[in-house]
Amino acid sequence: MTDTNVFCFGASGTHLFAGTFEGRVLKRPLSEIITGISEKKNETPKGFVLNQNYPNPFNPTTNIKFSITKKSFTTLKVFDALGKEVSNLISKNLPAAEYLLQWNAEGSPCGIYFYRLETESFSDTKKLILIK
């Protein structure tokens, strides 16, 4: 199925459901959703990048992908809409690589959050939405 416009997500039991504007409901097992953090070996990224999280909106987990081009002290933090830090996902020296990290917002209230990646020479912030 291509060019499907999703307007809402929901999770029940072991499945994620997505409602479409075409009146369909898509179902995917949660076990197929990517979890954890991984590093691609032997590839140096061409630039510092903070990608948009996916899925977005999400409940309760989302994936955040980023790239760093040189070994750097790196922080990745999540903030609420008022700017209060709610989660420190990474705060350490990382080698140049692409990374994929999962944030589990279980126990956090639904709403708009921001995640910020900072290194010695780069910073970027993106918005994410937690729904329940």
Image (tube, grey):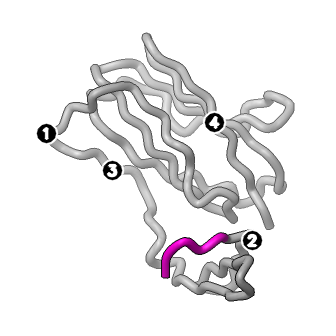
- Hey, what amino acid is under mark 1? Asn
Q: Nearer the viewer, mark 3 or mark 1?
A: 1
Q: Nearer the viewer, mark 2 or mark 1?
A: 2
Residue 39, position as x, y percentages in the image? 28, 45
The answer to whether residue 84 is above or below residue 127 is above
Residue name at image x 79 percent, y 38 percent = 80
Which portion, as a residue range, is magenta? 1-5
Indicate the quadrant where residue 87 lies. Answer: top right
Residue 27, position as x, y percentages in the image? 59, 86
The answer to whether residue 66 is above or below residue 53 is above
Q: Nearer the viewer, mark 3 or mark 4?
A: 4
Front in this rendered view, residue 50 or 92: 50
Q: What label does residue 28 carry, if any?
A: none
Front in this rendered view, residue 59 or 17: 17
Q: Earlier in the sequence, mark 2 or mark 1?
A: 2
Query: Marks 3 and 2, how far apart in space?
Result: 28 Å
- Hey, what amino acid is under mark 3? Ser
Residue name at image x 73 percent, y 52 percent = 129
Q: Which residue is mark 4?
A: 126
Q: What label does residue 38 carry, if any?
A: 3
Q: Is residue 15 magenta?
A: no
Q: Which residue is mark 1?
A: 42
Residue 3, position as x, y percentages in the image? 55, 71
Q: Main secondary structure of the magenta part?
A: loop
Q: Earlier in the sequence, mark 3 or mark 2?
A: 2
Q: Which residue is mark 2?
A: 8
Residue name at image x 86 percent, y 31 percent = 82
Which image quarter is the C terminus in? bottom right
- Hey, what amino acid is under mark 2? Cys
